[in-house]
Amino acid sequence: MIIAIDGPSGVGKGTLAKLLAKKTGYEYLDTGALYRAVTLYMIEKGIDCDDKDSIINQITNISDNELLKLTANPKIREEEVSINVSKIAVYQEVRDFLYDFQVNFSKNPKGAILDGRDIGTVICPDADIKLFITASPQVRALRRHKENKEKGLESDYQEVFRQLKARDERDASRNIAPCKPADGAIIIDTSNLSREQVLEKAMKIIKNKS
């Protein structure tokens, strides 16, 4: 079984995907971490994330092993990467580079759960279950603000909110794989739900499909 989980940042899709993986025993892939890994690679190489030509020239130098190693690097969650990752994600060459990696992962015989922004629309359009997780911008910004504070990072709610709204606009309006619900996707609004309630909803959907 393939479970595709899409949605914008800060909705809790990664948390849900991890919890579902533990419940089901399916393999889990955070596809957003792949894009963050590419972004971190470019930053560490001193390449401007607006310099499309340089990024395209460099991307083929990243091996699968190096890509996976970078996804485990905590630096991919730092602010500089968060600000630039949506710039990297608009380049078709970057998406093409990561496409096969994601599709191959989805074919895991144990079952696969992938979360991102275009899993149900592009990577796994034939997924057995498609979920689109959403929440209000205010709730999402507050969650991100709290996470930053818990990590000991300086965080200003209004700035977090501004950056989140800007990224939403880029992700939703881009011509290539915009962030939107896939055909047949079930939408779950997590604004007023706990992690446990979201998990319960998702597990009911999976059980009904099994």
Image (cartoon, rainbow, N blue to C red):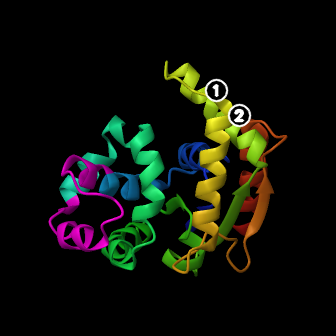
Residue on which disc 2 sits: 142
Q: Is residue 44 magenta?
A: yes
Q: Is residue 1 left or right of residue 82?
A: right
> Residue placed at 62% from the left, 37% from the top?
159
Q: Nearer the viewer, residue 10 or 88?
A: 88
Give SS at disc 1.
Answer: helix
Q: Quadrant of residue 208?
A: bottom right
Q: Which mark is residue 146?
A: 1
* Residue 20 image offset from top left, x and y in percent: 60, 48
Crowding near the residue tagged with mark 1, few <14, some 14–19, many ≥20 C-alpha atoms within 10 Å: some
On screen, 2 above or below 200?
below
> Magenta span has 110?
no
Q: Is residue 144 visible?
A: yes
Q: Which residues are magenta?
A: 40-64
Which mark is on residue 28? Answer: none
Q: Mark 1: which amino acid?
A: Lys
